Image: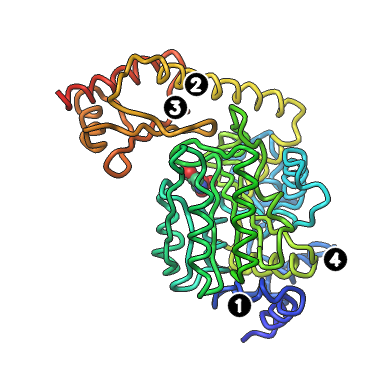
Amino acid sequence: MNPLAQQLNETLATECPNVYDMLSALGKAIYFPKEGILSQSAEAKAKAKKFNATIGIAIENGQPMHLKVIQDTLSSYDPKDIYEYAPPAGKPELRAAWRTKMIKENPSLEGKNFSNPVATNALTHGLSIVADLFADVGDAVIIPNKNWENYELTFGIRRGAQIVEYPLYNEDNRFNSAGLREALLSQKDKGKAIVVLNFPNNPTGYSPDPQEGDEIVAAIHDAAEAGVNVVAVTDDAYFGLFFEDSMHESLFGKLADLHPRVLAIKVDGATKEEYVWGFRVGFITFASTSDKVLAALEQKTMGIIRATISSGPHPSQTFVLRALQSPEFDEQKAEKYDVMKQRANKVKSLLDSGRYGEVWSYYPFNSGYFMCLKLNGVSAEAVRTRLLDEYGIGTIALGETDLRVAFSCIEEPNLEELFDTIYKAVTELIG
Ligand SMILES: Cc1ncc(COP(=O)(O)O)c(C=O)c1O
């Protein structure tokens, strides 16, 4: 094993043996090269005042070389904020700004010890880093039965982890924390589990209320007490889009110092929150009472980044940073939140109006981009294809009964026609 990896592992094993035990084989082996090109170049950037011939970029007239055809379209940005490589962990100012935003939006983080967010190539990449660091073949990844399909690829196919599902809702149509607890305790023999908590949930648009949030935390605590090392990941892709009286913050805050056997990791980003899907800017943040543990995990995260993408895109990190620093940011975000909330409210009022009879029910939703219909007596795939072929309407069929509708994509005045047409397609198929 590389001595640097060994050093990081020793730190983790001394400071928090449970976290060391959570690491995958790759997680144990990975390290960020201290004396490699990047660190020598960083040192030169600070000290080489005469000539800096360290890194594989090009300099002209004292700034990064660039083509006019590109710079003309980006003229409000300084070439140094666009063309140079961003550091592997992301632009420091962006990381600091995201941390400040996180604290402002999550009061439960008050007094908790957590790392500086490391910038990722958006949330999928953050999840993939979690998988690389912590998932070995056969490790359990616990997710609800209504989930984002990409977990299967990220944890299951790519890392060979075993996906363990529990029903998202209980018989009262509330979050099924008993199911989560059972799934966690079923890993007692292995002594390890990775839990992915995604609220607002894709595909249902569900977020837990404060009591359900406490139950989730209690289930994880119980598993830890029973001897399970829990990597507790919050996938906060749709953070902030809370339209009703659910929790309005991430469970990361409550998980941060829950138990020595719980490692809380927050995966979030600008993708959905800031409506910049194609920018590919996300973050991964670790919580630990030990700063040494945080530093070691950050080094390992940087090692994975260096080994896979080397560094994230600099222009989009700069774009997001400028947005976060803009005095108009909060106001513009609030405007978009209102638009999304009005769409969610409209969907709910249509569904509750009684006009669609018994052809479907809907899963409880209160947040995010989506809602899911549960169809009665007709297959979701049949409805999806009929909507597409006869009416030019695109929806997502999930399993036998569920139809996911991204109301985020439909202007409010069109929602009535959308749901009336889905109803029409369903009744035609039943008829
Ligand atoms: C729950 C969830 N997590 C993560 C992602 C991925 O986000 P990104 O586009 O930032 O990789 C998505 C995107 O659909 C999602 O729905």
Q: CA distance from mark 4 to mark 1?
A: 33 Å
Question: Comparing marks 3 and 4, which lies closer to the viewer?
Answer: 3
Q: Position of residue 35 (x, y in %)?
A: 72, 77
| Local SS, label 2 | helix
| For marks 3 and 4 on the same chain, the one whose residue lies earlier in the sequence | 4
Residue under the point 52% across and 65% down: 185
| For marks 4 and 1 on the same chain, the one whose residue lies earlier in the sequence | 1
Q: Would residue 213 be visible to someone looking at this image?
A: yes
Quarter occupied by residue 218: bottom right
| Local SS, label 3 | helix
Which residue is disc 2 drawn over?
343
Which residue is disc 3 drawn over?
407
| For marks 3 and 2 on the same chain, the one whose residue lies earlier in the sequence | 2
Q: Is residue 152 left or right of residue 102?
A: left
Amino acid type shown at disc 2: Arg
Which residue is disc 4 drawn over?
47
Q: CA distance from mark 3 to mark 4?
A: 53 Å
Question: Comparing marks 2 and 1, which lies closer to the viewer?
Answer: 2
